[in-house]
Image (cartoon, rainbow, N blue to C red):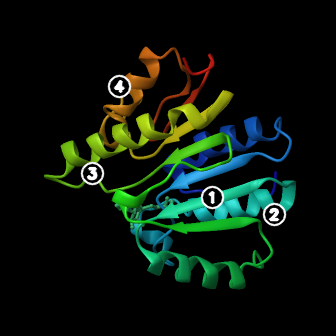
Amino acid sequence: MRYALPFSSVRRESMEKVFFLLSEVVKPIIMEVGRTRFADGMQGDGYSTIHFADYVQRHGGMLLSVDADPGTEKLCRELFGVLELDGAPVVFVDVKPESFHVPEADLNLLYLDGPDCTEGMERQSAQWHLACMKFLEHKVVKGGLVLVDDCMNDLFPEGKGSLAIPYLVEREYEVLYKGYQWLLRKTKETQ
Ligand SMILES: C[S@@+](CC[C@H](N)C(=O)[O-])C[C@H]1O[C@@H](n2cnc3c(N)ncnc32)[C@H](O)[C@@H]1O
């Protein structure tokens, strides 16, 4: 597959796996929580908005891109212009956490990459990602994917996934990839 930008090294394997699995889905609905916020990839983020927008522009489907900071929408629109992604089927949802709403569409991929788990914020970030996962879990289709960023460990999930991933495993999600990112697949309809 050809990509608009190279993947960051820690995410390359997991992102390639995600796009391989997505290629089995006709017109996938992707939701990311946490949008690209820097034009400078050296900051350590993953350019997820660019990668997902590029994918749905090429293959169909839709990206719902959620972020509390409207400045990130402006930046992404500028980046889309530079990278010829203006026509990509992307819906920007600029919401504050308290007004976050459940999407109408069912999700084939949910990407969790919200508040940073920087020093001193680890617990808060992990709890936020768990709450977000619980809030959206019923919108993930059976067979759908959940990808969590900044888990940092291939033995057990740390960081953003330290609470959300055990929650999913308990709900019988299948772990497909463990590493800096963790990738899981929903195996059962939501009870
Ligand atoms: C790590 S960045 C996302 C990076 C992006 N996924 C990428 O790969 O380029 C985290 C984003 O989460 C957003 N964010 C932080 N707290 C949030 C909240 N409570 N609700 C929604 N978005 C939030 C920030 O504005 C920031 O843009």
Q: Secondary structure at mark 2?
A: helix
Q: Nearer the viewer, mark 4 or mark 3?
A: 3
Q: Which residue is mark 3?
A: 117
Q: Quadrant of residue 184?
A: top right
Query: How far apart are the two marked residues, 1 and 4, measured between alpha carbons?
Result: 29 Å
Left or right of 18: which side holds 119? left
Give the numbered dot on residue 64: 1
Question: Which three-letter amino acid code belongs to the residue tagged 3?
Answer: Cys
Are the residues at dot 1 and dot 3 in contact (C-beta closer than 8 Å)?
no
Who is closer to the viewer here, 48 or 29? 29
Give the crowd class for mark 4: few <14, some 14-19, many >=20 residues within 10 Å.
some
Residue 155: where, in percent of width, then height?
A: 37, 24
Among numbered discs 2 and 4, the one appearing first in the sequence:
2
Is there any visible trace of residue 3 in the rendered image? no
The residue located at (44%, 70%) in the rendering is: 42
Question: Which three-letter amino acid code belongs to the residue tagged 2?
Answer: Gln
Q: Which residue is mark 2?
A: 57
Q: Which residue is mark 4?
A: 156
